[in-house]
Amino acid sequence: MRPVRLVIARCSVDYVGRLTAHLPMAPRLILVKADGSVSVHADDRAFKPLNWMNPPCKVLEETVADGPDVWTVTHGKSGEKLVLTIEEVMHDSSHELGKDPGLQKDGVESHLQELLAEHITTLGEGYTLIRREYPTAIGPVDILCRDGDNATVAVELKRRGEIDGVEQLTRYLELLNRDSTLAPVTGVFAAQEIKPQARVLAEDRGIRCVVLDYEELRGIEPDVLRLF
């Protein structure tokens, strides 16, 4: 496995492809991961990069004698490019991280995923499961499914739904919607409890919120008297 490379540099960034985007010259963190992905970060957000290129991709580093260095990151399938014009490098280091043991979810959250996959129509009539733990370059999506209209839906599951979970799902959606075989992909944020701020953020981004009843998914009748 290749080492992870961390570069802090004053650079500008241009994305050239189906969409174009430009980041003006400024100090930024460039992260080259072992899987070959390249992402560009600022320090004003937690984990979401300003721009990135997913694997498979190739990095060509060109050193110019009387000008800035240029990195051209080319995607192996689409041919889209991320062009970094580097004016000054303040830090450049590589680190072997080794094999990651993966995210260990607590029992309830893991069981929620299993139960919801088994009873996927809890999300709506006509829903069908594609798979659990759908792999992406930035981690697995809890559940990928299709709705009654056969459109792709990504589901992020939490015991307690907070803003960081919405941000995580937003990142997955941005990535999945780049895949023409899946797009358009909408999101469902599902949890036993969803904080008001998380609900507002999710709905503002077009993400549907679903509150799950763990006992009901397990098939346990509520402990209340009912009249028949």
Image (cartoon, rainbow, N blue to C red):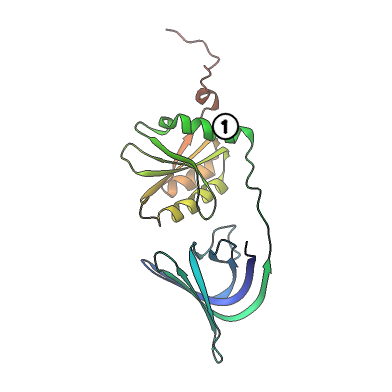
Residue closest to the far bottom: 66
Residue closest to the far top: 228
- Taking depth in this image into account, of 34 and 170 the one nearest to the observer is 34
Q: Quadrant of the C terminus?
A: top left
Q: Could you say which quadrant of the image residue 175 lies in? A: bottom left
Residue closest to the far left: 149
**Residue at (67% x, 75% y) in the render:** 91
Is residue 24 visible in this depiction of the protein?
no
Amino acid type of the residue that numbered disc 1 sits on in the rendered structure: His
Q: From the viewer's perspective, is 217 left or right of 107?
A: left
- Taking depth in this image into account, of 205 and 221 the one nearest to the observer is 221
**Residue at (42% x, 33% y) in the render:** 123
Q: Could you say which quadrant of the image residue 92 lies in? A: bottom right
Q: Return the residue at label 1.
A: 111
Q: Position of residue 144 (x, y in %)?
A: 44, 42
**Residue at (56% x, 61% y) in the render:** 35
In this rendering, is residue 78 above or below 169? below
Q: Position of residue 60 (x, y in %)?
A: 51, 76
